[in-house]
Image: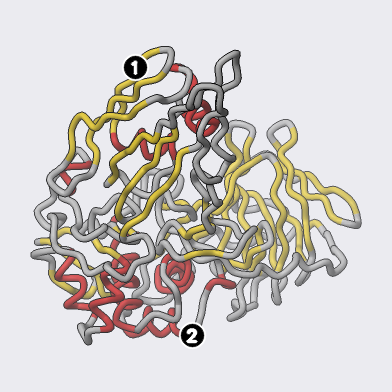
């Protein structure tokens, strides 16, 4: 996950809608010469908000002679799918576009793109072009953008922009390689804008330092043989990265366990109390959790399989399933049970209240301000509460004790920071975490 940032409010300038009879050119990729194009799913749902930024745009169905809607700069629209057709509603009324599988948002002919972004979707500005796909009652908003224009936002969303250039450059190369490796011409899009791919928050996320990191590594990718490497990354490994084959289905020769340098990470080591109400919600099918036993681990201590014992039964889960259910920072974890014993005639012993931990960014593990998006506070859902009854008893309090943040495979971002602070360049950082790869320039399309 990225660092959050302040999002300016949606512009509220007046709307001007007019049907265009002129024939517009068919959609083409608008990447710079020598710049590959990527397609990023920005959002999807039955209703989306859209506005032009600094230049007049045209929203039109795909086709050589389709009429469209002209959007003046700063003019917000509400897009809604109604009976298979896209309706665009502004202050001057509602216009329905002809039925089409795809609708494109393009610059009006004879204009050039503005440096500050071309369009605003759901309160964020983006460069490039926008494709709207109408499918299964949803509108999919897909950004077509040159990879070099995409990356400054990704680097800033995935790593603090104040970190040294060597670390930012390593992140830029890893993100570029990952994005290009994910291109799937037969699919509707290549990447999402979330942690399921890599986080992309548009123009507002960019900084001078991340633009510099991307420009100074322009076209550089990591190759293993003649293939783009799978340059996955995570926040902090807890001392040693993981073999890809110990967590995933395939062991790649360059994704092997290596020493990490993440000792200064705020999540290098951590403890997370698991309140009884959280455990009951996470494992409702067995009535909550009394104990968690680790059945199998990797060589670095990450959970492969665990047995969860509850009042109503036992459940065996994988490490990733356990992490997902409990909101753990990583699967490099063990569990301790604190079970107070009440004395005769006295109320049960109650451990200290669980103090909610600060929100933590899931990519870097850095604390975040209260109320910001992108972080979680696992285990802070309530205080430990004893059971009630004729004789006071107490539910066990389970504490997760772990190391690192993320899956642990590939480049550790906190480790990259430490290496950069030691004076290593981005090539050395990348070669440490992706063994046997080579830094090359990606062939132009």
* Residue 98 visible in the shown view: no
Q: How many marks?
A: 2
- Badge 2 crowding class, 10 Å Cα cut-off, few under 14, some 14 to 19, many 20 or more, is few
Q: Going from the N terminus, do you reach mark 2 or mark 1 first?
A: 2
Q: Nearer the viewer, residue 194 or 42?
A: 194
The residue that appears at 39% across and 41% down in the rendered structure is 399
Q: Secondary structure at mark 1?
A: strand
115 in relation to 403, above or below: below
Q: Secondary structure at mark 2?
A: helix
The residue that appears at 46% across and 39% down in the rendered structure is 274
Tell whether 1 sits left or right of 436: right
Reading the image, the residue beneath label 2 is 208
The residue that appears at 22% across and 75% down in the rendered structure is 441
Place of residue 221 in the rendered image (x, y in percent of width and height, measured from the top left): 24, 70
Q: Quadrant of the N terminus?
A: bottom left
405 in relation to 311, above or below: below
Tell whether 56 sits left or right of 356: right
């Amino acid at each position: 996950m990225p660092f959050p940032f302040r999002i300016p409010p949606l512009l509220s300038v007046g709307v001007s809608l007019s049907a265009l009879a002129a024939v517009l050119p068919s959609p083409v990729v608008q990447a710079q010469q020598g710049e590959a194009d990527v397609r990023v799913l920005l959002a999807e749902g039955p209703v989306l908000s859209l506005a032009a930024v600094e230049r007049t745009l045209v929203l039109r169905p795909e086709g050589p002679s389709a009429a469209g809607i002209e959007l003046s700069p700063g003019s917000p629209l509400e897009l809604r799918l109604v009976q298979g057709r896209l309706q665009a509603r502004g202050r001057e009324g509602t216009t329905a576009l002809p039925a089409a599988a795809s609708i494109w948002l393009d610059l009006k002919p004879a204009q050039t793109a503005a440096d500050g972004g071309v369009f605003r979707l759901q309160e964020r500005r983006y460069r490039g072009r926008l494709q709207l796909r109408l499918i299964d009652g949803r509108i999919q908003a897909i950004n077509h953008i040159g990879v070099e224009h995409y990356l400054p936002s990704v680097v800033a969303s995935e790593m603090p922009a104040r970190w040294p250039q060597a670390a930012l450059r390593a992140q830029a190369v890893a993100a570029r390689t990952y994005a290009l490796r994910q291109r799937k011409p037969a699919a509707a899009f290549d990447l999402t804008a979330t942690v399921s791919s890599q986080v992309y928050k548009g123009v507002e996320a960019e900084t001078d330092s991340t633009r510099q990191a991307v420009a100074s590594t322009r076209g550089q990718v990591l190759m293993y043989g003649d293939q783009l490497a799978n340059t996955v990354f995570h926040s902090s490994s807890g001392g040693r990265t993981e073999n890809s084959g110990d967590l995933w289905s395939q062991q790649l020769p360059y994704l092997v366990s290596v020493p990490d340098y993440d000792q200064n990470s705020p999540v290098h080591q951590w403890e997370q109390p698991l309140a009884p109400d959280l455990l009951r919600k996470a494992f409702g099918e067995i009535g909550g959790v009394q104990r968690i036993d680790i059945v199998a681990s990797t060589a670095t201590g990450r959970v492969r399989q665990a047995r969860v014992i509850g009042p109503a039964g036992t459940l065996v889960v994988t490490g990733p399933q356990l992490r997902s259910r409990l909101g753990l920072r990583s699967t490099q974890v063990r569990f301790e049970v604190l079970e107070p014993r009440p004395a005769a005639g006295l109320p049960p012993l109650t451990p200290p209240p669980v103090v909610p931990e600060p929100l933590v960014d899931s990519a870097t593990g850095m604390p975040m301000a209260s109320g910001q998006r992108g972080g979680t506070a696992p285990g802070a859902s309530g205080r430990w509460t004893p059971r009630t009854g004729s004789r006071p008893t107490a539910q066990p309090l389970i504490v997760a004790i772990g190391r690192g943040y993320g899956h642990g495979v590939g480049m550790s971002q906190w480790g990259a920071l430490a290496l950069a602070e030691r004076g290593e360049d981005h090539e050395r950082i990348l070669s440490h975490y992706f063994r046997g790869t080579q830094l090359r320039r990606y062939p132009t399309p």
